[in-house]
């Protein structure tokens, strides 16, 4: 009787093991009338989730990307080192903030109007309109040195564009 019970338990575990579906396969299977799940992840992680031993993968490409990213972050903090981005180079510098408003559509249009006005009167200064929650803002110029931004601020105030403008430290673009 004990022998029969052991055989039955062994048969039961064998059936369960052969019928077991891998977790990721079960998660990503297509079922009519239900949504589809797509998982994008490293193959090694999938192997770990499924209870397999992960195979070694060549990580040289990932390491190179990490090194490039670290260099890019260093370059932003150090104006002497620059990161080329197309025909532009991104460095730390200064801009003149001529508009800072709320989060409504009218604030967005005021920021855009401030940019258009500054560009029409001072085409040598690029204008940048952006939304940084919860404020729309317009910043003008790409100045490497603070004294350049101070001169631009004086010109903008003299023209009546920016009565309450201020100089802000920002990532700027130097065009090559």
Image: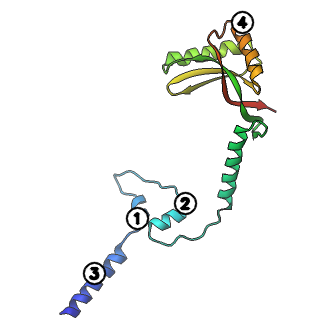
Instruction: Give the left or right position of residue 48, taking residue 95 as reference.
Output: left
- Location of residue 80 in the rendering, given as x and y in whole percent from the top left corner: 79, 37
Q: Quadrant of the C terminus?
A: top right
> Would you name the residue on which mark 4 appears?
158
> Would you name the residue on which mark 1 appears?
23
Mark 4 or 2, nearer chain start: 2
Mark 2 or 1, nearer chain start: 1
Mark 1 or 3, nearer chain start: 3
- Location of residue 133 in the rendering, given as x and y in whole percent from the top left corner: 51, 28
> Would you name the residue on which mark 3 appears?
12
Instruction: Give the left or right position of residue 8, taking residue 81 as reference.
Output: left
* Tag 1 near tag 3, CB within 8 Å: no
Q: Residue at (68%, 61%) from the top-left corner? A: 60
Q: Residues within 10 Å of mark 2 (few under 14, many from 20)?
A: few
Q: How far apart in space, not on screen, are marks 4 and 2 (Cα)?
A: 57 Å
> Would you name the residue on which mark 2 appears?
42
Q: Is residue 90 above or below residue 16?
A: above
Mark 3 or 4, nearer chain start: 3
Q: Residue at (65%, 11%) from the top-left corner? A: 162
* Tag 3 near tag 2, CB within 8 Å: no
Q: How far apart in space, not on screen, are marks 1 and 4 (Cα)?
A: 68 Å
Q: 58 or 69, which lies in front?
A: 69
Indicate which label's residue lies in the foreground, 4 or 2. Answer: 4
Q: How far apart in space, not on screen, are marks 3 and 2 (Cα)?
A: 34 Å
Q: 147 or 101, which lies in front?
A: 147
Element under disc 4: helix
Indicate which label's residue lies in the foreground, 3 or 4. Answer: 4
Element under disc 2: loop
Q: Residues within 10 Å of mark 3 (few under 14, many from 20)?
A: few
Element under disc 3: helix
């Amino acid at each position: 009787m004990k022998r029969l019970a052991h055989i039955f338990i062994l048969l039961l575990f064998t059936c369960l093991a052969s019928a077991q579906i891998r977790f990721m396969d079960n998660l990503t299977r297509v079922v009519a009338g239900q949504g589809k799940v797509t998982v994008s992840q490293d193959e090694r992680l999938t192997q770990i989730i499924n209870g397999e031993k992960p195979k070694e993968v060549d990580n040289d490409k990932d390491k190179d990307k990490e090194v490039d990213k670290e260099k890019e972050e260093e370059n932003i903090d150090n104006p002497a080192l620059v990161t080329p981005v197309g025909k532009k180079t991104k460095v730390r510098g200064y801009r003149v903030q001529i508009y800072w408003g709320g989060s409504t559509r009218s604030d967005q249009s005021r920021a855009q109007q401030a940019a258009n006005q500054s560009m029409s009167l001072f085409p040598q200064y690029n204008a940048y309109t952006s939304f940084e929650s919860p404020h729309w803002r317009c910043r003008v110029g790409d100045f490497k040195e603070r004294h350049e931004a101070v001169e631009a601020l004086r010109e903008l105030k003299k023209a009546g564009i920016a009565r309450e403008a201020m100089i802000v430290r920002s990532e700027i673009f130097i065009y090559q």
